[in-house]
């Protein structure tokens, strides 16, 4: 039986913690959902298994106050981690979303009610393996 989406996202948290530990950081899974701590600093883990991290509601995402994100990409059977400051990630998501809306005339063409957005690896390439985000 194939793993569920929930199981895949849990695996993303384990991968993030494992990579942190291998780099000499203290790390642990926190709570039942998307959180980990690295060097006692909380972070949200997001998993991409099909080329991009999906944002269901751009407004909810950009109004959050998370300080750190660990984006785990397992798309090509390799593991790549992008460690991104929350403000930078939210700013980029908002800017790309607004730019997209301008290009399409202000309304999503297929579903005007959709608030979906995506983060591509190219959008966060500068943050690949930036473990210094967790240095204190």
Image (cartoon, grey):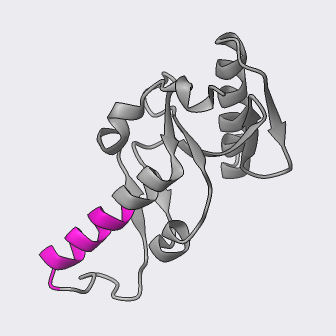
Q: Position of residue 119 (x, y in %)?
A: 39, 52
Quadrant for residue 112, please give it.
Answer: bottom left
Q: Position of residue 22 (x, y in %)?
A: 68, 11
Q: Residue at x 41, y 33 (%)?
A: 127
Please name whichever residue, 57 or 94, is drawn nearer the observer in this view of the structure: 94
Q: Is residue 9 visible?
A: yes
Q: Is residue 3 visible?
A: no
Quadrant for residue 64, please give it.
Answer: bottom right
Q: Is residue 24 left or right of residue 51?
A: right
Vertical order, 122 against 78 (above or below): below
Residues shaded magenta: 93-105
Q: Quadrant of the C terminus?
A: top right
Please name whichever residue, 80 or 20, is drawn nearer the observer in this view of the structure: 20
Q: Residue at x 61, y 62 (%)?
A: 65
Q: Position of residue 71 (x, y in %)?
A: 53, 40
* Most common SS among magenta residues: helix
Q: Residue furthest front?
A: 136
Q: Position of residue 35 (x, y in %)?
A: 74, 46
Vertical order, 49 against 90 (above or below): above
Q: Is residue 97 magenta?
A: yes
Q: Is residue 99 magenta?
A: yes
């Amino acid at each position: 039986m194939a793993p569920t989406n929930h199981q895949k996202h849990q695996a993303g948290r384990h991968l993030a913690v494992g990579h942190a530990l291998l780099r000499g950081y203290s790390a642990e899974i926190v709570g039942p959902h998307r959180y980990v701590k690295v060097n006692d600093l909380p972070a949200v883990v997001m998993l991409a298994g099909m080329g991009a991290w999906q944002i269901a509601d751009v407004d909810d995402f950009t109004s959050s106050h998370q300080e750190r994100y660990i984006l785990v990409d397992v798309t090509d059977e390799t593991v790549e981690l992008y460690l991104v400051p929350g403000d930078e990630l939210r700013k980029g998501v908002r800017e790309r979303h607004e730019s997209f809306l301008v290009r399409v005339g202000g309304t999503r063409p297929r579903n005007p009610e959709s608030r979906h957005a995506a983060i591509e690896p190219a959008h966060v390439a500068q943050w690949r393996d930036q473990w210094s985000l967790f240095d204190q």
